[in-house]
Image: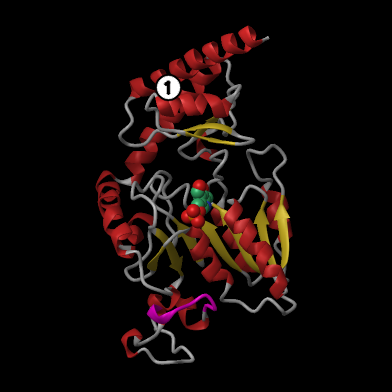
């Protein structure tokens, strides 16, 4: 399964291992380092996914110093601030490729360049890009990447993944580990663990086999359609969605410039949570994030007319919510 994902994200065979979710994959990486030395900074951004931020904070008890660069507009991350925060006391730079709330695309090449310049390592959460925005972990020279299958990969829950740069394998011994990471797992050796020489060293316990079977077709379909084709259609459809939303008077909390925008458009609709619940009831599949808005995410199977339909439906629900509010007053 890891090899199918590897094809989509530009990794090689054996370089991607499967995990229950991103939270576990990120915790495995955090558990590989000694945080008590002078080089002990984790640099991240305020709009990183909360799990990742929680994991950084938990590393503080082992000696890590956490630096989180805030967003100034809740959509973008000031890249100059982020790059300045990366210094020779930095051990790990942990960033999202595409921000989950706003779909803002960060410049991973620039972040990786700066990170390597100071002798640190970079972990990118590519959950919101893989499958809709082209990512090539090798070309970007990433050290680690994590993601899952609930979104663009169409694989469902329980199929998270971790990429680790091959030449780092011998240097990493995760504290979050288990019998499957042993060189000879079926020896059931009481230890201490003798790590597998390959990517299996990043595994831990029994894998979620049914979840992985369920995810398989999603990756295969994605591989057939091709992420470059998906991206071209996505840019066209998200641009159309933004135009429709603006015509309807809804502020857009995603970048207007398509080169900075992933596959999602976040709309600031009054009573967004309630409107989303009603949309879901009417079989429109989307979601709502507090402080951001309604996330509309067309994929390769989305028809153009569905873009018009979703905006019309939001308007019709908003009108009925308004009249209910007026009646209540
Ligand atoms: C960027 C990003 N990372 C991680 C997750 C989810 O993490 P997990 O796989 O641990 O549930 C999400 C889900 O919304 C996400 O958008």
Residue drawn at x 42%, y 22% is: 310
Residue 247 in percent (x, y) is at 53, 14
| Residue 13, picture quadrant | bottom left
In the foreground, 327 or 146: 327
**Residue 263 placement, left or right of 260:** left
Q: Which residue is drawn at 62% across and 13% down?
A: 325
**Majority secondary structure in the magenta region:** loop
Answer whether residue 108 is visible to the viewer in this image.
yes
Q: What stretch is highlighted in magenta?
A: 174-180
Image quarter of residue 236: top left
Does residue 21 appear to the left or right of 70 in the view shown?
left
Q: In this view, does 7 lie above or below 151?
A: below
Closest to the observer: 310 or 170? 310
Q: In which quarter of the image is the N terminus?
A: bottom left
Please tell me whether residue 74 is drawn above or below residue 271 in the rendered image. below
Residue 115, x across and y down, in percent: 62, 64
Residue 62 in the image, given as x and y percentages of width and height:
69, 75
Q: Is residue 12 magenta?
A: no
Whether residue 114 is visible, yes or no, is: no
Q: Name the residue under label 1.
A: 310
* Residue 178 on the magenta span: yes
Residue at image position (54%, 11%) is 319
């Amino acid at each position: 399964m890891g090899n199918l994902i590897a094809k989509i994200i530009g990794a090689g065979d054996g370089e991607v291992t499967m995990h229950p979710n991103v939270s576990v994959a990120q915790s495995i990486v955090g558990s590989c380092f000694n945080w008590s030395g002078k080089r002990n900074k984790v640099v991240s951004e305020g709009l990183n996914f909360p799990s990742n931020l929680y994991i950084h904070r938990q590393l503080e008890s082992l000696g890590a110093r956490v630096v989180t660069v805030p967003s100034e507009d809740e959509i973008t991350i000031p890249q100059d601030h982020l790059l300045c925060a990366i210094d020779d006391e930095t051990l790990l730079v942990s960033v999202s490729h595409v921000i989950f709330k706003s779909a803002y695309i960060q410049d991973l090449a620039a972040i990786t360049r700066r990170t390597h310049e100071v002798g640190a390592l970079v972990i990118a959460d590519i959950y919101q890009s893989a499958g809709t925005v082209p990512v090539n972990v090798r070309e970007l020279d990433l050290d680690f990447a994590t993601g899952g299958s609930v979104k663009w990969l169409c694989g469902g829950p329980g199929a998270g993944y971790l990429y680790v740069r091959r030449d780092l394998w011998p240097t990493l011994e995760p504290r979050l580990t288990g019998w499957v990471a042993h060189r000879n797992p079926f020896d059931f050796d009481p230890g201490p663990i003798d790590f597998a020489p390959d990517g299996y060293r990043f595994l831990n316990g029994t894998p979620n086999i049914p979840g992985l079977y369920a995810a398989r077709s999603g990756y295969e379909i994605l591989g057939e359609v091709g992420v470059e084709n998906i991206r071209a259609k996505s840019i066209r459809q998200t641009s159309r969605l933004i135009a429709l939303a603006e015509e309807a008077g809804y502020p857009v909390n995603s970048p207007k410039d398509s080169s900075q925008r992933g596959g999602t458009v976040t709309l600031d609709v009054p009573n967004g949570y309630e409107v989303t619940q009603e949309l879901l009831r009417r079989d429109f599949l989307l979601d709502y994030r507090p402080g951001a808005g309604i996330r509309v995410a067309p994929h390769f199977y989305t028809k153009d007319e569905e873009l018009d339909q979703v905006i019309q439906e939001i308007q019709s629900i908003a009108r009925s919510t308004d009249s209910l509010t007026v009646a209540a007053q």
